[in-house]
Image (cartoon, coloured by chain):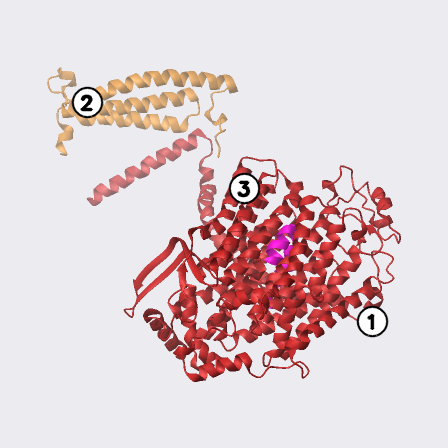
Chain colours: A orange, B red
């Protein structure tokens, strides 16, 4: 199983991509997820935080597609198509919310909002 | 050990049938006519119809007429039942109620049969005649008396009234002890409902509860007595029990009580505890005076004439059981005599005329018990019968006064009522009632009381009871005529009571107590004007008709004495029933010794009254005692009395030291009971309340506190800050990953 991770995932693709294995894709996915998570946790700007969440989203998407290709079946890719659709809708909503929040406080600082304190 | 073996023996008896019992002694039991069941059924119908009228919000006197009609028919049927009876016994079974059979551990076939059956003999007829007759008359009286409540409590009153008569009929006519118990509890319930009729008055509610609870104490004894009777005789039906007691009667007559099993001797002692509760005898009498909080017709019917005589009925019905017990009847006699005396002394010092009548009822009930105790069941039954009429008429007269004077019952605030316009019938009824109660010669009360007195001196060892009763007779005459001389004759004067709203629309802030209350020449007209134009209203036709009827009946009851030689008509009725004394012993089945004993009890050495034959001299003695009592009342409460509030008797009060105060305070029996029983119970209940509050509630609350504490501990986590949520989530994911990682390393 250990060597499977380094098997050619892109057999039949043009040469430049030919050497890429599943591990490469997963590495990219993990890096993107980590960057998104760190950005989400450290930045206070609502728009940047939102972008970070999108980054984590897409990292998950890359991992799904890579696994899908690795196993040679299409459900993972189909799933990602749906995720992208939902993400687009959600992005529109989230940006609209950010605009509204900005109008309320004239600020994009996430720490301005603590009304839900228990 | 002996008791256990007795019980075993008795179970055998019950299973095999009592040996030696034969049906020859008492008349055979026939199947009674079906319409006997209607006698209790009609009052129940009246009760249901009154309930329906209440549901339909009927705002007329309809419930009263329904009740009077049903009770009247019931009375007519009772009279027909009496006609039909002709000295025999009959049982009418309305339906089979309880019928179970089983095999006990010893392998004997046992059964419990208690039908809704009606046992009719002359004792039943005697009781039912005055129960239904008086109930009809008093319902008629109540139709007018309760007229202020038309549309509000009227239906409720008559529904309870009907239910009472139904229960009383079950009690008296039931052919087994279970049905008697049902009726016994039923009358107790109705008594509770009717005492608490004015449920907005705290004192009425308290009195109702007191009556109910005190009766429960007695009922426990009755229930135990019934259980023991079942264990002993294997049945609760009179026909079995009365037969089963026959074999021991002869032994009891001969004084050989050691031949009679202890359980048999215990049954009547338990039964009489029930009788003491219901009939307000010495340890348990305190509920009856308080029961006067109920409407007066209720006091007259339930708490004077009928329900309170249930105890006397119970003893009379099971008289053979009492005769075979060594101590039962002497206890009954002593309790009765002491009750008579104590209640009479309290009655002498009260000012509320209804309370005086209540104490007099307790006292007269004591007389009846003493009568049973001194072996004159005839005298007791006769006294029940005459007392029912004259005490009802006394109560109803007091009620008429109370109704007319807005609830005024204080004899210091009423005077000369008999001379006021429209009150003459009430005064006549009251006078006749008082003469009866005082035992004035040739009144019914005179004959019945006399029979008990004479018999007390005749019965061996009972002379002290005779003396107590004789003293009580004098006290009775005094307190009875104290009421009469204070309220019905003398200068005319009155103050209205505090229920004036019903009679007038004016405000009554001033009842005239301050300015006019003790006005020496308080004149009716003047006073009424000053007190906000209060007009006493004289009773109407219904009250007057009932009072006159009762007066005629209570006078006529004296005539019953002459309808036969041994105690008159009532004597005949009692002799033909199981309550007869000397008991009907089946002589053929027993030895000659028993026959001798019988003869001995019948004609043997009489006790004497100061060396004379009590049967002959008691007429004169009790007549003289009554006269003396009346004369003392005349001297102390009529002669020279110019105001309502004061009389010659007041001068005597300081001479007697603390006695009048004690008697006025009812010998502080209530307070003693309060201290000995109510207060300790109250203390215990406080302790239990704390246990409930701290332990039980504490546990429940502790379970409530757990989630609350956890919540308040975790609450800081919900900071409202987006970043802290994100950190928590990330931390959570990290922890989960760590667990998965460690698990995979460990190879799980």
- Dot 2: what SS? helix
Q: Which residues are magenta?
A: B281-305
- Dot 1: what SS? helix
Q: Earlier in the sequence, mark 1 or mark 3?
A: 3
Q: Marks 3 and 2: same chain?
A: no
Residue highlighted by disc 2:
A75
What mark, if any, has residue B50 been given in the picture? 3
Q: Chain of mark 1?
A: B
Front residue (pair B470, B413) = B470
Residue B477 visible somewhere in the drawing: yes
Q: Chain of mark 3?
A: B
Up the image or down, B211 lies above or below A118; here it is below
Of badges 3 and 2, nearer the viewer stands: 3
Tag count? 3
State the image coordinates of residue B553 (x, y, percent, origin top left).
64, 56
Residue B337 visible somewhere in the drawing: no
Q: How many angstroms separate mark 1 from mark 3 (CA)?
A: 55 Å
State the image coordinates of residue A103 (x, y, percent, origin top left).
50, 16
Residue highlighted by disc 1:
B655
Front residue (pair B217, B349) = B349
Q: Marks 1 and 3: same chain?
A: yes
Q: Residue at x 57, y 65 (%)?
A: B570
Q: Residue at x 32, y 65 (%)?
A: B110
Q: Residue furthest right?
A: B521
Q: Is residue B591 magenta?
A: no
Judged by its main secondary structure, the magenta piece is helix
- Dot 3: what SS? helix
């Amino acid at each position: 199983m250990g060597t499977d991770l380094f098997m050619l995932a892109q057999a039949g693709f043009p040469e430049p991509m030919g050497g890429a294995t599943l591990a490469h894709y997963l590495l990219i996915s993990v890096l993107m997820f980590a960057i998104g998570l760190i950005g989400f946790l450290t930045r206070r700007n609502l728009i940047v935080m939102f972008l970070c969440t999108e980054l984590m989203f897409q990292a998950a998407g890359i991992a799904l597609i890579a696994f899908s290709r690795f196993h040679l079946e299409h459900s993972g890719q189909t799933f990602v198509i749906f995720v992208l659709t939902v993400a687009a809708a959600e992005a529109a909503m989230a940006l609209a919310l950010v605009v509204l929040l900005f109008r309320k406080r004239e600020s994009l600082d996430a720490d301005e909002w603590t009304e839900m304190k228990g | 050990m002996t008791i256990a073996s007795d019980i075993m023996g008795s179970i055998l008896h019950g299973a095999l049938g009592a040996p030696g019992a034969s049906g020859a002694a008492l008349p055979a039991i026939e199947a009674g006519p079906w319409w006997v069941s209607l006698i209790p059924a009609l009052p129940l119908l009246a009760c249901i119809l009154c309930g329906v009228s209440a549901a339909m919000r009927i705002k007329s006197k309809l419930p009263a007429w329904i009740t009077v009609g049903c009770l009247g028919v019931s009375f007519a049927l009772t009279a027909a039942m009496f006609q039909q009876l002709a000295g025999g016994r009959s049982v009418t079974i309305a339906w089979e109620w309880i019928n179970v059979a089983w095999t006990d551990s010893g392998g004997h076939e046992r059964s419990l049969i208690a039908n809704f059956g009606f046992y009719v003999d002359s004792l039943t007829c005697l009781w039912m005649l005055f129960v239904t007759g008086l109930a009809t008359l008093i319902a008629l009286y109540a139709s007018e008396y309760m007229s202020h409540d038309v549309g509000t409590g009227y239906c409720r009153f008559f529904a309870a009234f009907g239910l009472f008569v139904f229960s009383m009929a079950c009690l008296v006519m039931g052919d087994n002890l279970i049905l008697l118990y049902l009726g016994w509890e039923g009358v107790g319930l109705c008594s509770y409902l009717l005492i608490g009729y004015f449920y907005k008055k705290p004192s009425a509610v308290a009195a109702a509860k007191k009556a109910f609870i005190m009766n429960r104490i007695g009922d426990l004894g009755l229930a135990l007595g019934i259980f023991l009777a079942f264990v002993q005789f294997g049945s609760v039906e009179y026909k079995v029990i009365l037969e089963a007691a026959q074999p021991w009667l002869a032994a009891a007559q001969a004084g050989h009580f050691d031949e009679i099993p202890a359980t048999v001797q215990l049954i009547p002692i338990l039964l009489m505890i029930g009788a003491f509760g219901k009939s307000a005898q010495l340890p348990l009498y305190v509920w009856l005076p308080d029961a006067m909080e109920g409407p007066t017709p209720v006091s007259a019917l339930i708490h004077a004439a009928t329900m309170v005589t249930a105890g006397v009925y119970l003893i009379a019905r099971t008289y053979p059981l009492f005769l075979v017990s060594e101590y039962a009847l002497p206890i009954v006699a002593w309790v009765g005599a002491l009750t008579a005396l104590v209640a009479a002394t309290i009655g002498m010092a009260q000012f509320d005329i209804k309370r005086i009548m209540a104490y007099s009822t307790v006292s007269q009930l004591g007389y009846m018990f003493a009568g049973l105790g001194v072996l004159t069941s005839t005298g007791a039954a006769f006294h029940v019968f005459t007392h029912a009429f004259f005490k009802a008429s006394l109560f109803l007269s007091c009620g008429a006064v109370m109704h007319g004077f807005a609830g005024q019952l204080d004899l210091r605030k009423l005077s000369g009522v008999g001379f006021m316009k429209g009150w003459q019938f009430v005064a006549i009824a009251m006078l006749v009632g008082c003469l009866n109660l005082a035992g004035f010669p040739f009144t019914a009360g005179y004959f019945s009381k006399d029979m008990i007195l004479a018999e007390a001196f005749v019965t061996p060892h009972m002379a002290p009871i005779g003396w107590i009763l004789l003293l009580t007779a004098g006290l009775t005459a005094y307190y009875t005529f104290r009421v009469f001389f204070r309220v019905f004759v003398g200068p005319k004067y009155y103050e209205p009571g505090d229920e004036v709203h019903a009679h007038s629309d004016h405000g009554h802030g001033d009842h005239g107590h301050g300015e006019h209350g003790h006005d020496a020449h308080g004149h009716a007209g003047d006073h009424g004007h000053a007190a906000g134009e209060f007009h006493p209203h004289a009773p109407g036709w219904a009250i007057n008709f009932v009072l006159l009827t009762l007066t005629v009946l209570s006078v006529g009851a004296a005539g019953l004495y002459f309808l036969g030689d041994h105690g008159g008509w009532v004597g005949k009725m009692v002799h033909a029933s199981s309550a007869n004394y000397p008991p009907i012993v089946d002589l053929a089945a027993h030895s000659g010794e028993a026959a001798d004993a019988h003869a001995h009890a019948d004609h043997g050495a009489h006790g004497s009254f100061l060396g004379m034959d009590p049967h002959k001299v008691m007429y004169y003695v009790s007549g003289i005692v009554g006269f003396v009592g009346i004369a003392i009342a005349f001297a102390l409460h009529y002669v020279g009395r110019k105001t309502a509030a004061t009389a010659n008797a007041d001068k005597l009060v300081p001479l007697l030291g603390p006695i009048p105060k004690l008697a006025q305070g009812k010998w502080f029996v209530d307070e003693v009971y309060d201290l000995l029983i109510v207060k300790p119970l109250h203390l215990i209940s406080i302790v239990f309340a704390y246990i409930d509050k701290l332990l039980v509630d504490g546990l429940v609350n502790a379970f409530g506190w757990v989630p609350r504490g956890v919540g308040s501990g975790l609450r800081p986590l919900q900071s409202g800050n987006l970043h802290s949520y994100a950190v928590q989530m990330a931390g959570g994911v990290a922890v989960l990953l760590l667990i998965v990682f460690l698990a995979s390393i460990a190879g799980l």
